[in-house]
């Protein structure tokens, strides 16, 4: 019996271990992303931030511009405000930067962001985008507490400002080592802390949407289907009791 349980639980344990390992990649505690996939205003703001700051280097090869009409935007609004690298609304969100140039400039080609939220998770992205700090030892002058030695510079630094980070290592009586992250402000950005957190929340909200645009509709259809099945179950049970009430 124990052997069977071990075989059945091994895949689940592997998935949980890999998830925990990814979450603690930089030894930094992930913060919960306060996203809302039904907040259309947040999704529109996130799309604007994405095309202005992310789409310069990162592509979204599995997302088409005209899919943004699901967020309440017209094709004219998309064309006038969100399209900088394409001519047709039906095109995918391509980027002019080639993989070769990306590797030469950053040390690694910037990944496609179509399904990055499904790969990394919303909490990881939210924490990552809020934990950049100045590091004169890195090639770009930036580093990240969530993703140490990251090759990506802090593209939102003008909004957040410049932060410094000191990691203090301490040991308790039993020899357990812990790290305390002490943040300092080097220069202010155009946004205060609350505004920047809102910008990051909207961007992560959009990245989650982009990973599965039909997720909200799919969940609504699933809930409706379960409700119909529940009603049918009640009716079927009532018919069964009525049919068998005189049978002994």
Image: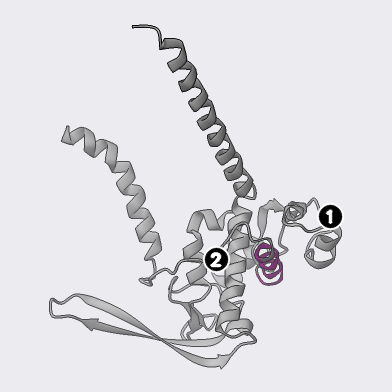
Determine whether 208 is above or below 101 in the image. Answer: above
Determine whether 200 is above or below 157 in the image. Answer: above
Q: Position of residue 121 (x, y in %)?
A: 49, 58
Residue that protrudes farthest toward the left in the picture = 174
Q: Marks 2 and 1: which is nearer the front? A: 1
Residue 193 sits inside the magenta stretch: no
Give the colouring mode of the picture: one colour
Quadrant in which the C terminus appears: top left
What residue is shown at x 52% (from left), y 53% (from top)?
Answer: 118
Between residue 57 and residue 47, name the one nearer to us.
47
Determine whether 208 is above or below 200 in the image. Answer: above
Disc 2 secondary structure class: loop
Work out whether mark 2 precedes mark 1 in sequence or the reverse, and give the earlier one. 1
Question: Mark 1 packing: few (<14 Cα in 10 Å), some, or many (20+)?
Answer: few
Span highlighted in magenta in the image: 42-53
Q: Residue 114: in sight, yes or no?
A: no
Considering the whole magenta stretch, tell me its main secondary structure. helix
236 lies left or right of 92: left
Determine whether 161 is above or below 220 in the image. Answer: below
Q: CA distance from mark 2 to mark 1?
A: 29 Å
Q: Position of residue 27 (x, y in %)?
A: 35, 71
Circle 2 sits on which residue? 108
């Amino acid at each position: 019996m124990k052997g069977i349980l071990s075989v059945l639980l091994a895949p689940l344990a592997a998935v949980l271990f890999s998830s925990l390992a990814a979450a603690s990649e930089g030894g930094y505690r992930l913060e919960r992303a306060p996203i809302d996939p039904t907040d259309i205003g947040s999704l529109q703001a996130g799309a604007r931030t994405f095309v202005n700051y992310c789409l310069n280097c990162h592509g979204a090869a599995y997302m088409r511009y005209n899919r943004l009409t699901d967020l309440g935007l017209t094709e004219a609004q998309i064309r006038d405000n969100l399209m900088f690298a394409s001519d047709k609304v039906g095109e995918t969100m391509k980027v002019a930067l080639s993989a070769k140039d990306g590797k030469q400039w950053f040390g690694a080609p910037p990944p496609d962001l179509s399904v990055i939220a499904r790969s990394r998770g919303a909490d990881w992205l939210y924490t990552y985008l809020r934990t950049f700090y100045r590091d004169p030892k890195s090639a770009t002058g930036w580093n990240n507490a969530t993703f140490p030695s990251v090759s990506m510079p802090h593209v939102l630094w003008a909004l957040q400002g410049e932060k410094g980070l000191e990691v203090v290592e301490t040991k308790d009586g039993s020899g357990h080592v812990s790290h305390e992250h002490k943040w300092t402000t080097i220069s202010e950005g155009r946004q205060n802390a609350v505004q920047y957190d809102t910008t990051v929340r909207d961007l992560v909200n959009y990245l989650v949407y982009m990973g599965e645009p039909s997720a909200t509709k799919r969940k609504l259809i699933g809930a409706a289907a379960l409700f119909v099945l529940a009603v049918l179950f009640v009716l079927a049970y009532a018919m069964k009791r009525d049919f068998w009430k005189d049978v002994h």
